[in-house]
Image (tube, rainbow, N blue to C red):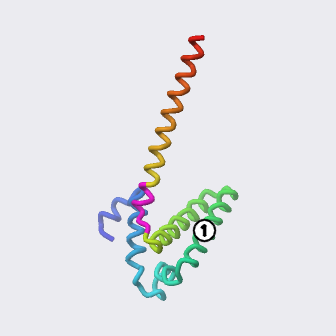
Amino acid sequence: MSEQETAQPARGSEILDQLYAVIEERRGADPSESWTAKLLHKGLPKICQKVGEEATEVVIAALAESREELLEESADLLYHLLVLWAAKGVQPDEVYEVLRRRRIEMDIKKKKQKKLEKQQIEENQGK
């Protein structure tokens, strides 16, 4: 890790991109020396099992109202989701693009709804 990386921690999607790069690097590592390599070596069923386990732990932490536990379990879930993406050849940017597209679609729907509401108000005032 460079001095710049330690001086200014990554934010938002940057940290996910960095973690994804580390996961990809460890793909060929010795499974006895790397949890990520071991998980990738065990294959999709094990990776999916871990994603499911971590998702359940996130829900349990949320219901227990433990903020710290929720943060920790959320980080675990994101890590295992990134491993799943790597195993399936999905790049984080592809997922980000889906999220961006959905956001744009939501904004368009919201604008259309506001326009419709405005028209209805104007029609009601004209009566």
Amino acid type, callout 1: Glu
Q: Quadrant of residue 2?
A: bottom left
Residue closer to the observer: 80 or 122: 122
Q: Position of residue 86 (x, y in %)?
A: 44, 72
Residue 96 is one of the magenta-drawn residues? yes
- Residue 56 is left or right of residue 31, and the answer is right
Residue closer to the observer: 119 or 89: 119
Residue occupying the point 67% across, 55% down: 65
Q: Quadrant of residue 69?
A: bottom right
**Neighbours of disc 1 within 10 Å: few (<14), some (14-19), many (20+):** many
Residue occupying the point 69% across, 57% down: 63
Residue numbers of the magenta segment = 90-97
Residue closer to the observer: 14 or 7: 14
Determine whether the residue tagged by mark 1 lies in a helix, strand or loop: helix
Q: Quadrant of residue 66?
A: bottom right
Q: Residue furthest right?
A: 64
Residue 38 is one of the magenta-drawn residues? no
- Residue 107 is left or right of residue 45, and the answer is left
Query: Mark 1 sits on what residue?
Result: 54
Q: Position of residue 82 (x, y in %)?
A: 48, 68
Residue occupying the point 44% across, 67% down: 90
Q: Is residue 124 above or below residue 53?
A: above
Q: Position of residue 88 (x, y in %)?
A: 47, 72
Q: Magenta stretch: dominant SS?
A: helix
Q: Position of residue 10 (x, y in %)?
A: 38, 60
Labels in figure, total: 1
Q: Is residue 12 above or below residue 34?
A: above
Q: Residue furthest top?
A: 127
Residue closer to the observer: 104 or 5: 104
Quarter of the rendering occupied by the N terminus? bottom left
Quarter of the rendering occupied by the C terminus? top right
